[in-house]
Image (cartoon, rainbow, N blue to C red):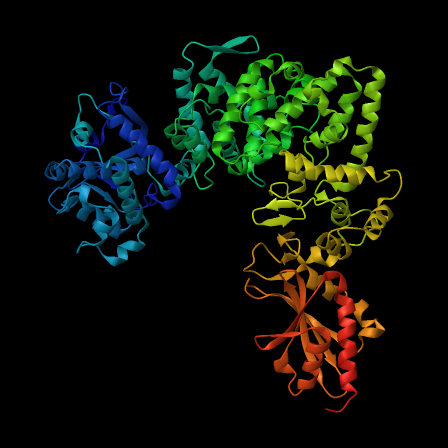
Amino acid sequence: MSDMNNATTFVGLLDQCSRIEVPQIQRDYAQGRETEAEVRLDFLNALHTALDPESTHRATPMNLDFIYGSMEEDADGSYFLPLDGQQRLTTLLLLHWYLAWRDGELSDFQERLWNGRHSRFSYKVRPSSAEFFDDLVRFVPEVLPDGVLSIKKLLEDQHWFFLSWRLDPTIQSALTMLDAIHGRFGTSTGLYVRLLDDKQPAITFQLLQLENFGLSDDLYIKMNARGKPLTSFETFKARFEEDLKTLFPTERRQIGEKSWSVRDFFAQRMDTQWTDFFWSYRSRGSKVFDAEVMNLLWTVAQLSLDPESKTFAKDTSALQNKQVTVNYSTLRDGGWLTRDFAIQLMALLDAWSTGEGKLTRQMGRKRYFDEEALFQKAIKSPAALNYAELLQFNAFVLYLTQWPTAVTADELQEWMRVVSNLAVNTSYDHVDVFQRCMASLRKLLPESRQILVHFAEMDATRLGGFSPQQVQEEVLKAKLMLADSGWRNRIEQAEGHGYFEGQIEFLLDFSSLLEVMIGSSADAWSELEHKEKQAVFDDFFAKATLTFDKDGLTEPIGAARSLYLWQRALLVVGDYLMPIGSNQSFGTNNADNPDSWKRFLRGGKADAVGRRLHLKSLWERLDGAVPILPQLEHIIESAIDLVPWRDEIVKHSQVIDYCLERKIRKVNDNKVYLLKRLQMNGAHAELFSYALYQDKTTISLDEQLKPLEIVGYNTVSESSIEPQVRLSFVGAKFRVNFAIESCHAGLRIVVDRSTSPGITEVEVSLMSEMGFYEEQKNLVRPVGYGSIVQILRRLVSVLSKKSETEF
């Protein structure tokens, strides 16, 4: 084996031999495979940087490491057989051809690469591969690169390109690589001469000749088996370590008693303690954890964005793109490999990795921030982290960086309690809200070790981004907890309710504690006053836990499904329905919905607070020490003097059940539509007629209404037609079909004359005795809600008499 330590170039290698020939036993060209997109992009970015005349690294060439091979002899002279390095050599050949074409230097390229019969660079893996490189080297396109969208398509359209070549993996990889080169170097000029510069070369490699080694098939197989490309994480680690030398040129960090540069500290930690940590979280059945590490890096990049930057919104959007490949090049090109990124990453990994391979929790409890759960989400699906989760994670990491040697579990718990309450209960209508919240976290950070005292004394209006209402709530809770020790457990227990998630202002309001915010001071209360207010708070919280579980509003214990007892009891107390556009809502459980019970409890505006007070009134009528079910049933059954529309809903649970999205369209007190979904152009019913339809059993048992039958109910899907309950009178000599539908002042009965022919005398009687009148082809009569049954009885009486006579 001869040692040739002097670096050489691609053209320099050709100066030493007649040709470069990839032997038959070698694998196909792989850097152009579709699956190698990241490796390909990283390599081309590095080559472009090396060739860029403005590059700060121009004085130092890019070295492609060792290329192993053997110089052999035949009748045409010496030729080089690469054992390891064929991928890099092939890419360099393609780059030479492309840059020569771009700079109008293909004649020079051909003088160097064409020997009169064949290309001086060739593949013996397949005959088709050798033929392709022959034709490529000789090819001079009739157009310039600027007018070409795809090099691959250009070459495939040439007369010398065989269709069968599309089955050759080496040729297909070469075509893909040429398109990638075109994409990266498409705006570059003058780089071909730079590529040939032998006095100040841009790209070199160390040529290592293997002599008398007996290049057996076994050696090639072994070399190729170990020559796997670097993974995304290995590439990141190697390149980021170099970045750290620039980001931290003089700073040092301790490992034990030894001081290290930040670059060496990162490398040492990543090779030992941090690797042991990640090993426990590798993909199931895998021996690598690269994807998990890269996902965590992606998450930390989101946390370390500067909220004062003008590009914050754009960067946040890019980092939340689920389709983006996570690798070093993407992070670097995005400008996200900053000092803050490095500081936060190292602080986080140092804190979590001290537990011999398992995550070392920094907090004693999971209630306000579950480190393990968020870590798992960050390493598996970082783009799925929502703004609230990112803010909580950011607060956690910021605390670690602010107090690296003084992390106190109780102080960290208090900090995360306040931040989590704020983050979870803020609506992020736009990324600007998230940006302002991120900025506020940094302003709060110096106070993170005494956050309760800070909030008790702060001006709630000066904390941007977060919900002002939630900020004020946190101020109030801080004052209460500092004023009397009896408040902490109560407040934390209520905050820990799975549905409230820290939003408990409604309990404070119901307990008359908001006065602390408008002049009264909790410090001035006596111990007895605190205990009295705490007893009221306990009572309302107990009722809150009976009303809501972790998923939202729940039926009382023992109640059958779909009875909607809470909603109906609330309507007895008052009109609590939430306006949602043109609709009104009975309330939904999904906390993200604008008509959720969580939004209802939040109150906010005066009218919303008024609706919330209906719940307080209802709770005040209940005794939490005895079963709630019979109490709600009594409230519903004994309701009196309700406006008609509320009365019908209170009496008929089926009305709410019909509304799958829990929405109604209330035109006025006399016209209320039940929406199957959300709009009137979808299926809908009408409240009063639908309630009458639900009373069909009662009607069928009424002796005075026989032989009246309720046939069915017609829902509609357009606003020009009214929904109807359909009825039929079947007498001895005739049948009358009619319907009941809504009108402007209540209901009206509509007799369908087309289905009841030959009963003119009956119609005359209806008009003369009951006030029916003709409208279009039907007979109609308005009727009030409260008198509908009475009118139906009269109708049946008139029809029955006529049925018994001859006409």
554, 712: nearer the viewer: 712
Q: Residue furthest front?
A: 768
Q: From the viewer's perspective, tell me whether residue 389 is left or right of residue 769.
A: left
Q: Nearer the viewer, residue 41 or 11?
A: 41
Quarter of the image where one finds residue 158: bottom left
Q: Is residue 330 above or below residue 567?
A: above
Which quadrant of the view contains residue 174? top left
Residue 516 in view of the camera = yes
Is 679 on the left-hand or right-hand side of 210?
A: right
Residue 43 in which image quadrant: top left
Which residue is located at x 24 percent, y 51 percent?
A: 153
Is any part of residue 357 visible from this angle? no
* Closer to the camera in the image, 312 or 713: 713
Going by the picture, which residue comes out furthest to the right?
626
| Residue at position x 30%, y 52% in the image | 168
**Looking at the image, residue 545 lies above or below residue 804:** above
Q: Position of residue 786 (x, y in %)?
A: 76, 61
Q: Residue furthest bottom?
A: 806
Quadrant where the image shows the C terminus: bottom right
Q: x, y (%) of residue 331?
A: 41, 30
Query: Is residue 739 toward the left or the right of residue 568 in the image?
Result: left
Q: Locate the N terminus and report the quarter of the image it occupies.
A: top left
Residue positioned 30% across, 38% down in the render: 86
The picture places residue 760, in percent across and down from the top left corner, at 66, 85
Q: Position of residue 212 (x, y in %)?
A: 30, 33
